[in-house]
Amino acid sequence: MISATHRPARKTTVARLMSGAAAASLVMALTACDAPILDGGRELGWQLDEDGHFGEATRNNIGFHTGELQYGEILAERFAAEVPTTINFAFNSATLDEEARAVLRQQARFIRHFPEVRFSVYGHTDLVGSRAYNQRLGLRRARAAVDFLVSQGVERSRLEALVSLGETSPIVATEERERRNRRTVTEVTGFVQSHPLVLDGEYARIIYRAYQGVSSD
């Protein structure tokens, strides 16, 4: 039989052990908060940033509620309807011929008319040659188009994304030489965030602005 004089000591020991266990549990819980929750071996939410666009989901959500995305799509459709968006190239070349220059002049007039808007130029090739070489060639074509647009008075800062898709997005699925695949495409990217009309959310005033284009110089 354990004497009464020893019971408090035992209770103190048990209490200490319990306190130690509780502390260990707390440490484990806090550590677990820092550990990633995995989905198939990857952190939850990884697909929201799969292409390296951190915060893209949040931006898209904001853009939807402010109307930026909607008006951006409308303006993109208007640009494609009123101006030729595509130029073509000779085989294995990034040189602009006169036909390409005429199209780019039309694009430049439209772009200058909408200083609140950003654009991208995508470079493409046909399927002749290696993928790595075609990637570089597509970028050279995109840069040639952008340089010409800048020479026509377009701010380079609004032509923000030079992108080469190389041979990955052909119009005609053939491994032979195909002029229609050797191209650049200019597209509306979005709005210049520092512009006063954009800050005020007056996207409608931008996209419905009167514009009279001409087919050639």
Image (spheres, grey):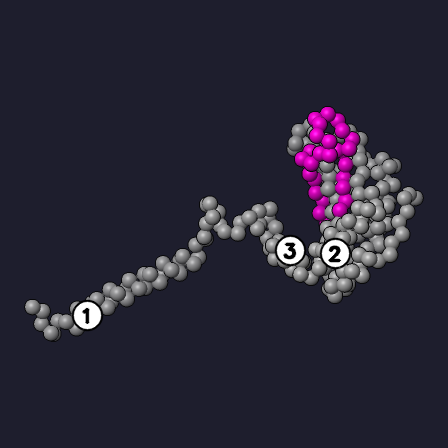
Q: Secondary structure at mark 2?
A: helix
Residue farthest to the left?
1
Residue at left 76%, top 41%? 185
Q: Which corner quadrant of the image does residue 145 belong to?
A: top right
- Range of the magenta residues? 160-187
Res. 157 visible in picture: no
Q: Which mark is residue 11?
A: 1
Question: In whole angstroms, how far apart are the C-alphas of marks 3 and 1?
Answer: 60 Å
- Could you say which disc has been placed on residue 60 in the image? 3
Under mark 2, the amino acid is Tyr
Count neighbours of disc 2 (C-alpha within 10 A) and say few if under 14, some if 14 to 19, many if 20 or more.
many
Q: Position of residue 6 (x, y in %)?
A: 12, 71
Give yes or no for contact between labels 2 and 1 (Cβ–Cβ under 8 Å).
no
Instruction: Name the element at disc 1.
Output: helix
Identity, as a three-letter code, of the amino acid under mark 3: Asn
Mark positioned earlier in the residue sequence (3 or 1): 1
- In percent of width and height, residue 208 lies at 82, 57
Question: What residue sits 44% from the left and 57% below the top?
Answer: 34
Looking at the picture, does residue 118 appear above or below residue 18?
above
Q: Which mark is residue 71?
A: 2
Q: Residue furthest right?
A: 217
**Left or right: 86 with respect to 49?**
right
The residue shown at (70%, 43%) is: 163
